[in-house]
Image (cartoon, helix red, strand yellow):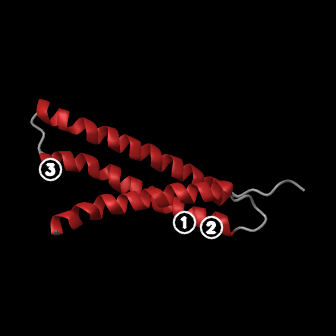
Amino acid sequence: MPPARNTAGLISLILGVVTVAVGLAHQMVAYALPRLMALSSVSVGSASAVLAPFQITTAVLAIAACVTGAVGLRQRNAPHRAAAAGLALGASAVLGALVGTLGPLLVAAM
């Protein structure tokens, strides 16, 4: 009998890795924005508009990684390592997005 496959776990791992890659691209753009704003007439609003798609994409991919990872972990007689890794990457990105979104609001409320 061939070994069982865990397609949901593999999808979760792929989504988790892509989430990390999008997060790294977001950081690179965020670090470059102040320099670009100083060299050109880019407003803060325009800079925020550049970063928003990265944040939204990261959140959607992270949630999808969590959901497919949970589905992959529930499969019986199938390998769970990829599902667990994808779930961990997705959960980490979701937590990072929550802290990144709510952290400034909490600091501003103090």
Q: Residue at x 66, y 65 (%)?
A: 73
Q: Residue at x 15, y 36 (%)?
A: 37
**Residue kind at label 1, given as amino acid type:** Val
Viewer-side residue, 36 vs 85: 85
Q: Residue at x 58, y 62 (%)?
A: 68
On residue 45, the disc is 3
Q: Could you tell me how far apart the alpha carbons at marks 3 and 2 are, in whole angstroms?
A: 39 Å
The local crowd at label 3, few if under 14, some if 14 to 19, many if 20 or more residues have their Cα within 10 Å, is few
Determine whether label 3 and label 1 are within 8 Å by CB. Answer: no
| Residue denoted by label 2 | 71
Going by the picture, which residue comes out furthest to the right?
1
Q: Secondary structure at mark 2?
A: helix
On residue 8, the disc is none
Residue 91, how many percent across, how many down?
A: 49, 61
Q: Could you tell me how far apart the alpha carbons at marks 3 and 1 are, in whole angstroms?
A: 33 Å
Residue 83, how many percent across, how many down?
A: 63, 58
**Residue kind at label 2, given as amino acid type:** Val
Residue 30, how many percent across, how many down?
A: 27, 42
Point out the tag, 3 or 2, that comes first from the N-terminus. 3
Q: Secondary structure at mark 3?
A: helix
On residue 67, the disc is 1
Q: Could you tell me how far apart the alpha carbons at marks 1 and 2 are, in whole angstroms?
A: 6 Å
Quadrant in the rendering for residue 60: bottom left
Determine whether label 1 and label 2 are within 8 Å by CB. Answer: yes
Residue 102, how many percent across, how many down?
A: 28, 65
Residue 69 relative to residue 58: left or right: right
The local crowd at label 2, few if under 14, some if 14 to 19, many if 20 or more residues have their Cα within 10 Å, is some
Point out the tag, 3 or 1, that comes first from the N-terminus. 3
Image quarter hosting the N terminus: bottom right
The local crowd at label 1, few if under 14, some if 14 to 19, many if 20 or more residues have their Cα within 10 Å, is some
